[in-house]
Image (cartoon, rainbow, N blue to C red):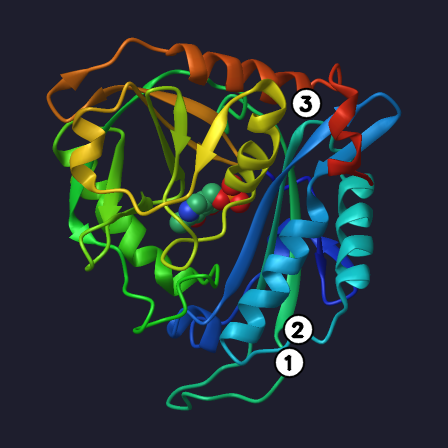
C-alpha cells in the first residue's frame, strides 16, 4: 500500500520495500527499538509537523533512558523528517521515526553500536482515519501498567508495547475499544496508546507523569485548557473516580480527543461540555484558525 513511498534510512532515501531488518536483528529479536509518531498538517504555507521539537526530544530521552545512542542530533533528525515529507509529498499525514539496532545479534544482549534511524511519512487515508472523532467504549484492563522500576516506562520503547497490546486485546475481547491500565500502586495510569482525562465538577483531571508516557497531546491540552478557563489537575487518579466522572476522554497524536461514551457498564453523554470545548480548541489549533499556537508547528 505504501510501496510508492520512500524511507529515510541512516541518511539516505531508499524505496519503502528496501527498508527492512534481518530477523535476527537485535531490534526485532529483542524488541530493543524506540520510536516516535506525530501528525503532519497542511498549514497555510505548506506542510507542518505538530510539536516536532517535543517529539524529537522525547526520542532522545527514550534513547538516554535505555542507555542507547542514535548518532544523530535532533536537528539532523528534524532535517530527515522534512526531507521524507517533501520527497513523499505528504500533506495531512503521519511521521513515524524508528531507532533500533539493525545488526544481527544471536545471543548478544548489550550492544554498543549506534542505533539505526528510519523515518517514514505516510499520507492520511481511510485506513489511518486520522481525524476520526467517533466516541469510544473503554474499560479497566485486567493487565497492570508496567511498573517504572521494571523498565523506564517514559521511554517510548517498542518492547513496552506488549503491555499495551495485552490491554487493548483484553478490552476488545470484552467488547470495548480501549483498555485503561491501572498501575501496581492502584492508581490509574493510561490507555494502551492514549492518555486518559476525566472531568469532575468542571476540573480536568489526568494522572501525573512518572508512571505514564509523557504524552504530547496530553501536554498540549494541559497547556491550552487554562486559556479557555478550564482548571486542570495532575494529581493521582483512582480508577473508582472514573465511575463517577462527569466526562472521560482519551487522546493521542493520531486521534487528538476521543470522548468516552461508555465506560464499563456506564453510559456517558458525549461529548460532555468540557470535552466539547477542548475538541473545539484543539480543532482550532489544528486548522490554524487559532493563531495563539502557531509556535507548536514546525515547517517541513
Ligand atoms: C502509552 C501511550 N500513552 C500516551 C500516548 C499519547 O502520546 P502522544 O500524545 O504523544 O501521542 C501514547 C501515544 O502513542 C502512548 O503510546
Q: Going 79% across and 65% down the picture, which residue do you hit?
A: 11
- Mark 2: give few (<14), some (14-19) or many (20+) Cα within 10 Å: many
Q: Position of residue 256 (x, y in %)?
A: 51, 28
Mark found first going from the N terminus, 1 or 3: 1
Determine whether label 1 and label 3 are within 8 Å by CB. no
Q: Position of residue 101 (x, y in %)?
A: 54, 75
The relative height of residue 209 versus residue 175 in the rendered view (above or below) is: below
- Residue nearest the viewer, comparing 110 with 53: 53
| Residue highlighted by disc 1 | 114
Front of the two marks 2 and 3:
3
Specify whether 84 is left or right of 151.
right
The relative height of residue 283 versus residue 100 in the rendered view (above or below) is: above
Q: Going 45% across and 61% down the picture, which residue do you hit?
A: 154
Mark found first going from the N terminus, 2 or 3: 2
Determine whether label 1 and label 2 are within 8 Å by CB. yes
| Residue highlighted by disc 2 | 70
Specify whether 274 is left or right of 296.
left
Q: Could you say whether the residue bearing mark 3 is in a helix, strand or loop?
A: helix
Q: Which mark is residue 285?
A: 3
**Mark 1 and mark 2: Cα distance apart in space:** 5 Å
Rendered-image quadrant of the N terminus: top right
- Mark 3: give few (<14), some (14-19) or many (20+) Cα within 10 Å: some
Mark found first going from the N terminus, 1 or 2: 2
Amino acid at each position: 500500500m505504501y510501496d510508492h513511498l520512500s524511507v529515510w534510512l541512516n541518511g539516505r532515501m531508499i524505496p519503502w520495500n528496501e527498508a527492512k531488518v534481518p530477523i535476527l536483528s537485535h531490534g526485532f529479536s529483542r524488541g530493543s527499538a524506540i520510536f516516535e509518531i506525530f501528525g503532519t498538517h497542511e498549514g497555510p504555507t505548506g506542510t507542518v509537523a505538530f510539536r516536532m521539537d517535543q517529539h524529537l526530544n522525547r526520542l532522545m530521552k527514550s534513547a538516554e533512558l535505555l542507555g542507547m545512542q542514535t548518532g544523530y542530533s535532533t536537528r539532523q533528525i528534524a532535517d530527515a523528517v522534512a526531507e521524507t515529507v517533501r520527497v513523499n509529498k505528504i500533506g495531512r499525514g503521519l511521521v513515524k521515526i524508528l531507532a533500533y539496532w539493525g545488526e544481527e545479534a544471536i545471543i548478544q544482549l548489550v550492544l554498543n553500536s549506534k542505533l539505526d534511524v528510519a523515518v517514514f511519512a505516510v499520507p492520511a487515508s481511510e485506513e489511518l482515519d486520522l481525524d476520526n472523532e467517533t466516541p469510544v467504549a473503554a474499560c479497566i484492563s485486567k493487565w497492570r501498567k508496567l511498573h517504572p522500576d521494571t523498565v523506564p516506562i517514559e521511554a517510548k520503547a517498542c518492547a513496552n508495547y506488549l503491555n499495551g497490546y495485552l490491554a487493548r486485546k483484553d478490552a476488545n475481547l470484552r467488547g470495548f475499544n480501549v483498555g485503561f491500565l491501572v498501575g501496581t500502586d492502584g492508581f490509574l495510569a493510561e490507555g494502551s496508546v492514549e492518555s486518559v482525562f476525566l472531568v469532575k465538577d468542571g476540573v480536568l483531571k489526568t494522572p501525573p507523569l512518572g508512571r505514564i508516557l509523557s504524552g504530547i497531546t496530553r501536554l498540549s491540552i494541559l497547556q491550552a485548557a487554562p486559556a479557555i478557563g478550564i482548571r486542570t489537575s495532575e494529581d493521582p487518579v483512582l480508577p473508582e473516580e472514573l465511575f463517577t466522572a462527569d466526562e472521560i476522554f482519551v487522546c493521542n497524536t493520531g486521534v487528538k480527543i476521543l470522548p468516552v461514551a461508555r465506560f464499563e457498564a456506564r453510559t456517558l453523554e458525549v461529548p460532555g461540555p468540557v470535552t466539547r470545548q477542548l475538541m473545539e480548541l484543539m480543532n482550532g489549533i489544528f486548522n490554524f484558525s487559532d493563531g495563539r499556537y502557531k509556535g507548536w508547528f514546525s515547517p517541513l
